Image (cartoon, grey):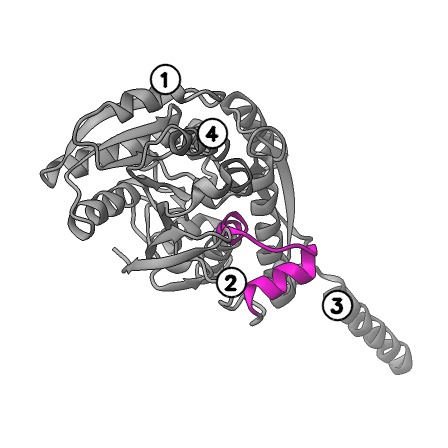
């Protein structure tokens, strides 16, 4: 009888041990779904795909470091179209049930989907929205790209105080990004005592700028032209401006470092001053390797600034998630308090509004397509 009791006791203990061993471990219920919204086709598909690859690298490294909190990406194509982006976000939120979305690269799509993600309680981390109006949607909306409020002010300050220029023109892409940057620049430059003699926008399919070049050439006192636009259109403008004998200083946004601009502008691209994030390919990734080396090993191509912002968007989001004890409900507050994050696009801090502050560079284009740094502005 005692033997039978002992045998049953052994059976019960062994069964209990097995049952405990079979219980799912904390965080091991399968990879967490993370949404990504990018323009993977359409006019900015090259930048969108490179940005996605930066996200993929950061997520892969994070998952390797935290196997109990591995992530899987649910990727949707916005085509850089607000309506398409909205449809994709509705699917990510309502079907895939993601707790957070990295996207979109464009300001227009990011601004169109932010109200939807806020209402759904989903975090939105944009790697590319720079429009000044991309703030104030709510406590779950963030961006990693610096606001045009800062970008435009830096260029206005540089041209007025460092180059001693007092009169210029603004020729901009007539979309959310171009107009936002142009308006900030104009407001700041005029507040410093300068004059904007001409303020003109163009549609993003414009190829003939010669009538505008003629107007600019005939504008008395014109010292510079600021070009917050798109790569292909800026290339047409710059080439036609130089061919037309317009020799004013040209200043621009990051479009002049895009391959489409370099190919289209050719030798006319030399000597343009422009603003750029403080992207350093030698900065270390989560795995401790230089960013360029890690990106190259994963994707067999060179990264660009879009790749770096994709990486840093994921880095910031996942750093905050870890800081919040892997609790998505506490992650927005952790993001808002994130300060001094060493990313590959510079030392990064966030505000409660979701806005970001980081260093920015003034560069000048060279003959060989590269650029030299003229000035680095500290984190705001």
Q: Secondary structure at mark 2?
A: loop
**Sequence-wise first label, 4 or 2:** 4
Q: Secondary structure at mark 4?
A: helix
Q: Are marks 3 and 4 in contact (CB under 8 Å)?
A: no
Front residue of 99/154: it is 154
Label 2 environment density (alpha carbons within 10 Å; few <14, some 14–19, many ≥20): many
**Sequence-wise first label, 4 or 1:** 1
Residue 358 at x, y = what percent?
A: 33, 56
**Sequence-wise first label, 3 or 2:** 3
Q: Secondary structure at mark 1?
A: helix
Spatial CA span between label 4 and label 2: 30 Å
301 is higher (above) or lower (below) than 248: below
Residue 42 at x, y = what percent?
A: 60, 28
Residue labelled with disc 1: 211
Query: Is residue 124 something one can see in this rendering?
Result: no
Find residue 281 and name its label. Answer: 2
Residue labelled with disc 4: 236
> Range of the magenta residues?
290-310
Q: Is residue 275 magenta?
A: no
Labels 1, 3: front one: 1
Residue labelled with disc 3: 21
Labels 3, 2: front one: 2
Label 3 environment density (alpha carbons within 10 Å; few <14, some 14–19, many ≥20): few
Q: Are marks 4 and 2 in contact (CB under 8 Å)?
A: no
**Sequence-wise first label, 3 or 4:** 3
């Amino acid at each position: 009888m005692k033997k039978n009791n002992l045998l049953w006791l052994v059976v019960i203990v062994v069964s209990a041990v097995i049952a405990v061993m079979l219980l799912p471990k904390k965080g091991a219920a399968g990879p967490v779904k993370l949404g990504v919204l990018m323009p993977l086709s359409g006019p900015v598909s090259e930048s969108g795909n490179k940005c996605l690859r930066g996200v993929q690298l950061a997520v892969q490294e994070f998952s390797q470091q935290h196997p109990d909190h591995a992530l899987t990406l649910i990727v949707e194509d916005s085509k850089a179209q607000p309506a398409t982006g909205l449809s994709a976000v509705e699917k990510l939120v309502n079907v895939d049930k993601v707790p957070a979305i990295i996207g979109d690269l464009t300001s227009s799509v990011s601004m169109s989907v932010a109200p939807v993600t806020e209402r759904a309680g989903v975090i939105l981390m944009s790697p590319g929205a720079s429009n000044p109006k991309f703030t104030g949607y709510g406590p779950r909306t963030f961006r990693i790209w610096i606001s045009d409020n800062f970008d435009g002010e830096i260029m206005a300050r540089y041209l007025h105080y460092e180059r001693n220029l007092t009169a210029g023109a603004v020729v901009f892409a007539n979309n959310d990004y171009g107009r936002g940057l142009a308006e900030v620049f104009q407001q700041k430059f005029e507040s410093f005592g300068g004059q904007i003699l001409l303020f003109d926008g163009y549609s993003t399919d414009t190829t003939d700028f010669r009538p505008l070049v003629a107007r600019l050439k005939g504008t008395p006192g014109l010292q510079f032209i600021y070009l917050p636009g798109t790569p292909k259109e800026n290339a047409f403008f710059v080439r036609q401006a130089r061919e037309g004998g317009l020799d004013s200083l040209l200043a621009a946004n990051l479009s002049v470092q895009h391959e489409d601009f370099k190919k289209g502008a050719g030798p006319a691209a030399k000597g343009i001053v422009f603003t750029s994030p403080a992207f350093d390919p030698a900065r270390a990734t989560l795995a401790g390797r230089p960013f360029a080396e890690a990106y190259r090993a994963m994707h067999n191509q060179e990264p660009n600034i879009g790749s770096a912002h994709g990486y840093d968007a994921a880095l910031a989001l996942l750093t905050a998630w870890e800081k919040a004890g892997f609790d998505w409900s506490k992650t927005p507050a952790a993001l808002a308090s994130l300060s001094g994050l060493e990313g590959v696009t510079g030392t990064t801090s966030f505000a409660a509004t979701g806005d970001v502050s980081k260093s920015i560079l003034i560069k000048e284009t060279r003959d060989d397509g590269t650029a030299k740094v003229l000035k680095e502005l500290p984190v705001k």
